[in-house]
Amino acid sequence: MTTILVTGASGQLGSEIRERSVRFSGYNFVFTDVNELDITDARAAASYITELSPSWIINCAAYTAVDRAEDEEDRATLINGSAVGNIVSALEGSDCRLIHISTDYVFDGNSPVPYSENDTPSPASAYGRSKLAGEKAAMCRPQTMIIRTSWLYSSYGSNFVKTILGKAGSSQTLSVVFDQVGSPTYAADLASALLEIISGIIQNRLNFIPGIFNYSNEGVCSWYDIANEIVMTAGSECKVIPVRSSAWPSKVKRPAYSVLDKARIKENYSLTIPHWRTSLNNCISKINRT
Ligand code: NDP
């Protein structure tokens, strides 16, 4: 039976993969987080991975505290960069395929058009630099797909959607930035896409294509647009006020524009990706049900 190892499985994306994995019978999914498999521990990672001998690894483990990374770049680089090298080293000599998750933050956000996989990364933040180091480590292995995604949210974990939803009920106004433009990604959609791609490849319906792929929901918006949609969906009277990023002083230079061009993944894997509004509403409905 094909073994699929998911690291960082208690996070947003890992939890969505776990939830959806029950629909993919016939595969042996193994979900680990830092307590079972700390990817920064090279020796432990090597012994765990060698013993398990997975056919696929989806690496969702990451340091995702973007603001804190400015003060903890070494730690961010250890988890997002060097630890990816540990996974790659542990796989030496095996046929295992690695799917590594990366981010729009590898770009500085100065592009006037959506970023393609071939654009040269130029991260403007410690988090972005650490994730780029991870991409480089992952690419040392030829059997690697890197999926760059952006503005991930889920009914699991903490994120912008849940924060705004929580505040919409109790605040009269909310100030939200309108000058950062991108595409949100419902982690449930990305999880489904990953599992469809993997099962399609295992069943020889799809080809394994190494390299970088972009994935986000369809459409383009600002954080202000997302907040407005959440408040409207919640039926709240709260007024969302558009403000510039400079209204929220931060050490992090966030990309002003980080739209990812998804043509490569859509064409090669015949994916139909939902629009961000549809997926946002699906996520909010799920949060309200739980
Ligand atoms: P989360 O932060 O929700 O999950 C990451 C998981 O990795 C957490 O459970 C975390 O544990 C765990 N982890 C941390 N350190 C280690 C370690 N040393 N060994 C094993 N596990 C560890 O991330 P997301 O699900 O949101 O993100 C998934 C991927 O998508 C990541 O690669 C991220 O960089 C990328 N991404 C995320 C975006 C976002 O907006 N969140 C946007 C674009 C890309 P703990 O919580 O205890 O630290």
Image (cartoon, grey):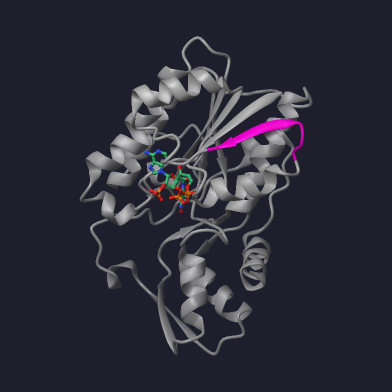
Residue farthest along the top direction in this orientation: 93
Q: Which quadrant would the N terminus be assigned to in this image?
A: top right
Q: Please state the extent of the stretch shown in magenta in the rendering.
A: 24-31
Q: Which quadrant would the C terminus be assigned to in this image?
A: bottom right
> In the rendered image, which quarter is residue 256 located in?
bottom left
Is 230 situated left or right of 208 in this image? left
Give how far across and how far down residue 139 sits, in percent.
45, 23
Q: Image point 49% across, 31% down: which residue?
A: 118
Give how far across and how far down residue 229 sits, in percent.
58, 74
Is 48 situated left or right of 281 in this image? left
Q: Image point 53% across, 69% down: which residue?
A: 226
Question: From the viewer's perspective, is residue 90 above or below residue 224?
Answer: above
Q: Image point 36% across, 37% down: which residue?
A: 80
Give how far across and how far down residue 47 sits, in percent.
43, 20
Residue 200 in the magenta stretch? The answer is: no
Q: Image point 51% across, 51% down: which residue?
A: 259
Give how far across and how far down residue 175 sits, in percent.
39, 78
Residue 81 appears in the picture as rendered: yes
Question: From the viewer's perspective, is residue 187 above or below residue 194?
Answer: below
Question: From the viewer's perspective, is residue 41 above or below residue 112?
Answer: above
